[in-house]
Image: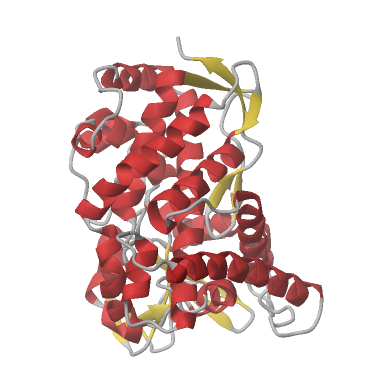
Amino acid sequence: MIPRVSGTPVLGNLGELRRDWLGLLTRVAAECGDVGSFRVGPRVGVVINHPALAGELLVRHAEHLEKGPLLTRLARLYMGDGLITCPQAGHAEARAHLAPAFTPRAIARALPGIQACVDAAVEALEPGSTIDVHAWLTRLAIAIVGRALVGEDLDAPALERAATDALRDINHRIRHPLAAPPWWPGRRRRQARATNRTLDALVDAVLARRRAEAASSRDDAVATLLAAPFDDRAIRDHLVTLVLAGFETAASHLAWTLALLATRPDVEADFLQEIRRLPAQPSVDDLDALPRTARILEESLRLYPPAHTLGRKTRSPLTLGPYALPAGTVALVSPWLLHRRADVFADPERFEPERFAAPLPRYATMPFGAGPRVCLGARFATLEARTVLVALARRVRLVPVTPGLPPAETLMTLRPVGFLARVEAAG
């Protein structure tokens, strides 16, 4: 029997879900241990909070799972059947067709474009000015996605607005599962249609320009999509997914990294010492040979994984350790929760990159997921993060206006809210 936290007689833990999703997960883990559950109305969620059990679920039992029904159904409003939301039956084939855009060689070819975007953005920063760090990084990440994956500049303001509207709508619907369904006429349906019109227009314009080219030697993600046996709808869904996932997670990860570094001047000093020896235009090998930088980014992902909760639904009964999960069980693995296990990470709330200098238990961290649905763009994201962090630190310092870490907004990703910083020239 899987233990369950207490709740109200009818609604269960709906109030907690609305107020503090991560707080609800924390209570389940604190009261129930490695496996526990909560209830929202008639629906039950099972929280898996042990590295070995989480790996067993996501890897060993992957063929018996679908993506979580609630998030998938809602994210599909905007992403359609893109790589994140498509059913398990078609996922492996779609991933295989997209994989050529994310090979090590393809990512290495993208590095000059990434570097050019970063250099332009950093050079535009004015010492003495104050910026919203997450907003600035979002615009930069959109530019990088445009240059490296799409092959052209994207309409950053329109894309940022559309992404924010979509994420907040999904978040609202997750927190209000008993509210009107997405098809119900009203303000939210109108807003969702307007958001999709924006996304469709951006994608349609890109595809029209690329298809009009007489011959193309490009080898970016759009070229990969157009060469695959996808119909127009599938191309649209995969491209929207790549663009939205590509900039939203990158901006959040880098913003949290900068916020955390500001709390540890000693760690920042070690990082600055490590990057002093780099050439002006570092290569992939140069960026890979930065152990301190790698550990800083890994520790940031441990504390603030952009994908804070992974949901799955069992297609058939399965056994997970000593627990039996019937068909139709909604199982949740939360990297945010898993990464804070005190038996794995001493003083788990502390930003301590050197904890990654020693091997960790398998599946103790999974910022990009695990199993066949692990993030296809993980390597691209890693290279992008190192490039941005290095280029930024060489030219400016971002000094937080308010000491300490900013609050987090729990959308599909964990966004820092109100992270303002003063731009200073690098000393």
Q: Is residue 262 above or below residue 53?
A: above
Residue toward you, 120 or 394: 120
Q: Is residue 410 visible?
A: yes
* Above or below, 197 relative to 50: below
Q: Give the number of marks.
A: 0
Percent of width and height locating residue 18: 67, 63
Where residue 324 sits, quadrant-wise, is: bottom left
Q: Position of residue 147 (x, y in %)?
A: 43, 49
User: 383 or 332: nearer the eye?
Assistant: 383
Report the residue at 50% width, 80% height from top: 69
* Position of the C terminus by quadrant: top left
Towards the viewer: 173 or 122:
122
Residue 306 visible in the picture? no
The answer to whether residue 66 is above or below residue 110 is: below
Residue occupying image coordinates x 68% and y 76%: 11
- Classify 424 as above or below 200: above
